[in-house]
Amino acid sequence: MDLGISGRKAIVCASSRGLGRGCAFALAEAGCDIVLNGRDQAALDATAAELRGRHNVAVTAVAGDVSRPEVQERLLAAAPEVSVLINNNGGPPRREFRDVTREALVEGVIQNMAVPIELIRAVVDGMMARGFGRIVNITSSSVLAPIPGLDLSSGARAGLTGFLAGVAREVAHRNVTINNLLPGKIETDRLVSGFKWVAGRSGRRVEDVAAETADSIPARRLGTAEEFGRIAAFLCSVHAGYITGQNILVDGGLLARAF
């Protein structure tokens, strides 16, 4: 399917690896010019080189922590007429809620709530003026169902979800959509770190924790960053203009619910 976004500019935050990387490759496959971002310069350069080699699109790499104002400024300067924004950022490390200090709480809210809002605020008026914009926020299935140790991440992302629920309805008339993708057990470095956390607390092997997790999913496997990225790319397409303000689970059916 032609997604109708070839030649458009896309900013993909935290995209040197994991879910952001999957989104960047899917958007490049659709013909978007990509602004990559990551804290690890080597990983960022490798991803940029692979993108350029695989797809005939322009790729700009912006290194740094997307929560830093100067990094945000460089991201925005790299795509002054951006059409697609993928908000993504690593969540706080797993910890017991009793161990969450005020400093950790503030940092978690900055990384997983304030930063996406800041970037949306910076790009949304331009998108509205041009009559096209697609914003996808990568949150987590933990927004809907708790995951042990991720209380801070879940709370900050739930705050983002609530904040944007109204904003999405305010901008839809100008063909600007805002949606959230809620990943479940997608095979990424962060998921593996979670397996290690559980293994350390339970005395089991990491491999056994991973196998048990996969077996608990109705799809009987972990998800991939590639398939996640293609779902994000569809939400950014011309065909998805009537989808906005939605929280879309990508979890292989793990969270059992009818609505």
Image: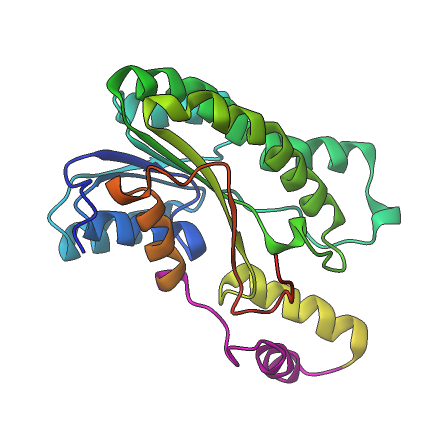
- Where residue 126 appears, as percent x and y from the top left, is 32, 17
Q: Is residue 213 magenta?
A: yes
Image-quadrant location for residue 197:
bottom right
Quadrant in which the C terminus is drawn: bottom right
Quadrant in which the N terminus is drawn: bottom left
- Where residue 15 appears, as percent x and y from the top left, is 39, 47
Q: Nearer the viewer, residue 42 or 116?
A: 116
Q: How is the image coloured?
A: rainbow
Residue 201 in the image: above or below residue 23: below
Q: Is residue 257 magenta?
A: no
Q: Nearer the viewer, residue 237 or 230?
A: 237
Is residue 117 left or right of 109 when viewed as pictured? left
Q: Residue furthest front?
A: 258
Residue 195 in the image: above or below residue 118: below
Q: Is residue 74 visible?
A: no
Q: Residue furthest right?
A: 98
Q: Is residue 225 visible?
A: yes
Q: How many marks?
A: 0
- Where residue 5 appears, as percent x and y from the top left, is 20, 40
Residue 146 in the image: above or below residue 61: below
Residue at coordinates 57% horizontally, 78% vertically from top-left?
Answer: 214
Is residue 15 left or right of 198 when viewed as pictured? left
Is residue 157 left or right of 175 when viewed as pictured? right
- Where residue 233 appears, as percent x and y from the top left, is 31, 49
Residue range in magenta is: 204-226
Q: Nearer the viewer, residue 159 or 87?
A: 159
